[in-house]
Image (spheres, rainbow, N blue to C red):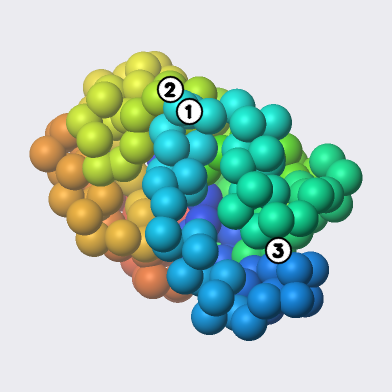
């Protein structure tokens, strides 16, 4: 019997639009979007930041050096978070119904600025009982350690957890950790996967 349902964040709860993000950086820096993409891809800053190896001030400083431009902290947060789109991909009403019977955990490869921005602009994340965030636990999916942290947050066994994520590699790692897990496609498909496992959603 399932006791905890664990959700990824990006492209599961909150949609991601990377072209929009590159376009925002292009407008802010005067560089072509392709050059923005090339510069960001030329360094290891994104991974290091999400792995908790860089503080937010150090990350901002590094990107300012990369783009040779300074930003106010709030402007930088908004620019860095310009990849997030609307509307959310899972209805908050569904989460509220699930929350009546199951513990809800958010498991995400993310970073401090992104998560602070999301909490301000996407109230749906406040429905979760606990967050397991890569930059806090210093481990990223599909590393086994972050799944262990998720099981601890779930307060049950791995076999009593269901996890959904948009990336197949992350789903495979969750299954290796003993969880029930399925790739997120859309909300109707998610409902089907939950019902297959005895989750009653009216």
> Is 145 situated above or below 170?
above
Give the residue drawn at x 48%, y 28%.
Answer: 52
Q: Residues within 10 Å of mark 1 (few under 14, many from 20)?
A: many
Residue 129 location, x and y as percent? Answer: 58, 28
- Mark pair 2, 3: CA separation: 25 Å
Q: Could you tell me if the residues under marks 1 and 3 are in contact, i.e. CB atoms within 8 Å? A: no
CB within 8 Å, label 1 to label 2: yes
* Label of residue 52 in the image: 1
| 27 over 159 or under it: above or below | below
Residue drawn at (16%, 34%), measured in percent from left and top?
178
Cα–Cα gap, marks 1 and 2: 8 Å
170 up-or-down from 138: above or below: below
- Looking at marks 1 and 2 on the same chain, the residue that comes earlier in the sequence is marked by 1
Instruction: Report the disc number at residue 137.
Output: 2
Q: CA distance from mark 1 to mark 3?
A: 21 Å
Residue 161 vs residue 128: left or right? Answer: left
Q: Which residue is mark 3?
A: 82
Between residue 7 and residue 135, name the one nearer to us. 135
Q: Position of residue 106 (x, y in %)?
A: 50, 38
Q: Quadrant of the C terminus?
A: bottom right
Could you say where residue 127 lies in the image, as x and y percent from the top left? 66, 39
Secondary-structure class at tag 1? loop
Query: Which of the two discs, 1 and 2, sits closer to the camera?
Result: 1
Along the line of sight, the residue nearer the viewer: 13 or 190: 13
Q: Is residue 103 found left or right of 197 in the rendered image?
A: right
């Amino acid at each position: 019997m399932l006791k905890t349902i664990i959700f990824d964040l990006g492209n599961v709860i909150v949609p991601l639009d990377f072209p929009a993000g590159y376009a925002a950086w292009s407008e802010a820096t005067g560089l072509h979007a392709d050059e923005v993409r090339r510069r960001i891809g030329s360094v290891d800053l994104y991974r290091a930041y999400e792995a908790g190896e860089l503080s937010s001030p150090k990350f901002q400083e590094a990107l300012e050096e990369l783009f040779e431009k300074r930003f106010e902290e709030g402007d930088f947060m908004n620019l860095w978070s310009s990849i997030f789109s609307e509307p959310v991909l899972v209805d908050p009403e569904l989460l509220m119904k699930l929350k009546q019977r199951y513990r809800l955990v958010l498991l995400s490869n993310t970073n401090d600025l992104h998560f602070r921005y999301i909490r301000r602009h996407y109230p749906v994340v406040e429905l979760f009982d606990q967050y397991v965030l890569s930059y806090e636990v210093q481990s990223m999916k599909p590393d086994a350690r972050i799944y262990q942290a998720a099981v601890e947050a779930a307060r049950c066994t791995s076999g009593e957890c269901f996890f959904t994520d948009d990336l197949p590699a992350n789903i495979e790692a969750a299954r290796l950790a003993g969880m029930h897990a399925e790739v997120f496609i859309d909300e109707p498909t998610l409902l089907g996967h939950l019902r297959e496992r005895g989750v009653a959603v009216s």
